[in-house]
Structure formats: structure tokens, C-alpha cells
Amino acid sequence: MMSTTDSAVAAVFDEVTALAATLRATGPEAEERRWIPDENIELLDKAGVFRLSVPRRFGGLEAPVADLTRIVSEIARAETATGWVSMIWASSAWVPSLFPDAAQEEVYAGGSVRVSTGFTPSGTLAPTEDGAYTLSGSWGWISGCRGADWALLAALLPGPDGTPAPSAALVRVSELSIADDWHASAGAGTGSSTVTADAVRVPAHRVISLLDVLAGSTGDRSNTGATGRNYAFIPFFMALGASAYLGLARGAYELFLDRLPGRGITYTSWTDQSQSPVTQVQVAQAENKIAAAEALQEAWLRELQRHADAGTLPTAPERAAARGRAAFAIELANQAVDELFEAAGASVIMRDVAFQRFHRDMRGLALHALFAYRTNQEVHGRSLLGLAPDTLFL
């Protein structure tokens, strides 16, 4: 259940929970079309999901990070691709709040918005004579781009001395071209296609330093300070990302239990699998790993909110810990789903068994570079040993 005191945010959670069966039934369709059904987007929009990250002064709900994670987890528990895309849109829709007021007024004008993100600076920004920029380049694996309103894209901008510096640009998705190149064995329904910008004009207020974003030092906006929503960038994204994996694991756990009644274990004397001690141990281990991951998440959510409420930013060791612990929670969720897959029997590989999709999507999405287990443990371990983190993404 939601812990929020905001009844409007709690109502979104309740609406999403009520949609679980409807969303889950669309999983095969999402895989087949390589993109989530339009009806899912409409249902979540009506429920208020895409208002969650929008500031209240623009008609949004401005939900705290803990509530965002719970709602994203609920969506992922119901349907994997829809959960992943909702996580991308909800987390990325918060980022424009770090931009100048003029950009916020554009992006948040409708009170509800969907934003997709490409953090790799694979494009370039060139200044124009009138003080704006042109954006060119291509960005791969942009989840949710087919239904997003805006895209937040990283690109290199030459500094005064000609040295390129990473920047972040906000552009309307309607100004980009989207390739039909998403053919994946995991996360197939996320529509994570390549987007391309061909000299797209971007006004100056929609371009800021990516390093300032990462550091939490963006200015020229009225919502700085102890607003309760100025989170550290990477820890915020780690928290939202983990919520999708944890929801997916919960969904897989439920699907496993749903299949259990009446099932035996072939080539054994067990006619009721639930009576088998081996299965009992596997189920307990899986559930406890998910519960441990959720408890770990609660701890870093409290830390994130504590800093936001005080108008402070986490230290470098705290940021490294956020990466390490989020990735550790994701790994626990990953292991839990693997545990259940091993216990599910050979018939689980059939396409009409929803569990196999949850398992494939968990395994594939866990390879995402930002959430990769060993990479994040290295970052955290270096910090614990008093070494430099060896990455700007903290």
C-alpha cells in the first residue's frame, strides 16, 4: 500500500493496481508488435501516471520518489514492457524540472508528459547565430520513443576553446525520425528504437550542461533548494530503475504460484508440486530475495528524500552506495526469478505461459549498462576502499 499522505497520488496507485489483469493480458501483443499497446498508454494516462513527475505549478502531482517507485513497481508487476516504459517516462519526465523555467513551461504545459532519454552523448550540438543550437546525431535503444512527447538527448557541445563537453538537450519527439530497428529477444515490447536528429533547432533554454545535471548544480530556475524534489540525478534514476525490476520479480513470483495448483513433478512420485520440499525451499528463497531487495530499496529511498527535504545533495560515497545497492537489489530480484524458472518445469518455455516472458525480460533488461550488477559493485567497492569512483555518473 502507498504510504503517501497525498490522496491524488494514492488514487493513481489504486487505479494502476486495478488495471493489473488488463495490462498483463496485453503482454503477448506488446511482444508481437514490438511496442506496448496504445490502449495501455491511454489507461495509464487516464489513471494519472504521466502527471506524477510534473510539478504542481503546472497541474501535475509532483510525487515523491518513494511513491513513484511504488507505482512503477505495480505497473511492472502487471506487464513487463509497459512497466519498463513507464519507468523510463516517469523518471525522465522529472529531469526537465532541472532545466530553466522557460524549458519547464514548454515541457510541462499540458500537466501530463512522457519523456524518453538517451544519456550517451552520441550527437553533436552546434551554436547558431541567433543564440540557439542545432542538434544532429543518432541515439540507440531509446525506450518508449514511439509514445513519448519529448526526448532528452545527450550530445557534445564545443566549449570556448573548442573542447567538446557533454550537454543535455530537450527536443520534441515529433522533430526526430524513429527507425524500425527494435528486434530483441528480451524487452521486445519496449519499442527501444534508434532516434535521429537532423540539424534540429534547439533554443538555448533547452540545452544545459550534462555535468551540471549529474552534479545537481543546474540554475536559472525558480525551483532550486529544499523543495523536496531536487534529487541527485543518478541515485534518482537508480531508484526508479530498481523499482521496475522489483515489480517484475513480484509479477513473476505471482505467476509461478498461479501455475502451481494441480501440477506434479514429472518422473517422480510427486503429484502435487507444492508438497515437494525442494519446491518449498525454492519458493522461500525466491520470496526472501525479493523481500530483501525491497527492504534495501526502502533504505536508499529514505536517504534520497532526506537530502531533497534538506536541500542538500548526497556525498560521493553516498552516490556510489546508491549505485551499488540498487544494482545489488536488482541482482537479488534477478536471482529470484531464475530460482522460480528452475522450479517451473519444462512447459514454462511455451509462449502461452506468461512466466517465460517475465524471465526473459528480467534476464535481458538486467544487462542494461546503468543497472549492470558487477559494474555498479565496482563503483561501490572503490568508494568503500577510499578510491576514486572512476566514473562521472554518480
Image (cartoon, grey):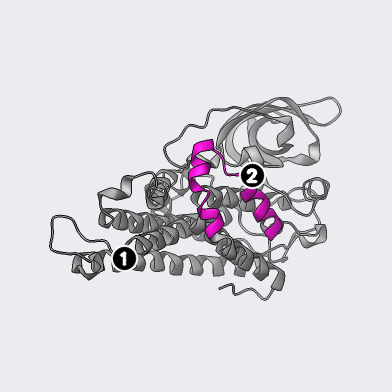
Q: Is residue 146 magenta?
A: no
Few, some or many residues within 10 Å of mark 1 (<14, 14–19, 20+): few
Mark number, residue 167: none
Few, some or many residues within 10 Å of mark 2 (<14, 14–19, 20+): few
Residue at 56%, 58% in the rendered image: 72
x%, y% of residue 24?
51, 54
Q: Is residue 178 above or below residue 206?
A: above
Name the main secondary structure of what is drawn in magenta. Answer: helix
Mark number, residue 38: 2
User: Marks 2 and 1: in contact by CB < 8 Å?
Assistant: no
Labels 1, 2: front one: 1
x%, y% of residue 256?
35, 60
Q: Residue furthest right?
A: 130
Q: Is residue 28 magenta?
A: yes
Q: Amino acid at mark 1?
A: Pro
Question: Do we see residue 52 in this rendering?
Answer: no
Cα distance, mark 1 to mark 2?
34 Å
What range is drawn magenta here? 21-48
The secondary element bearing badge 1 is classed as: loop
Residue at 78%, 62% in the rendered image: 56
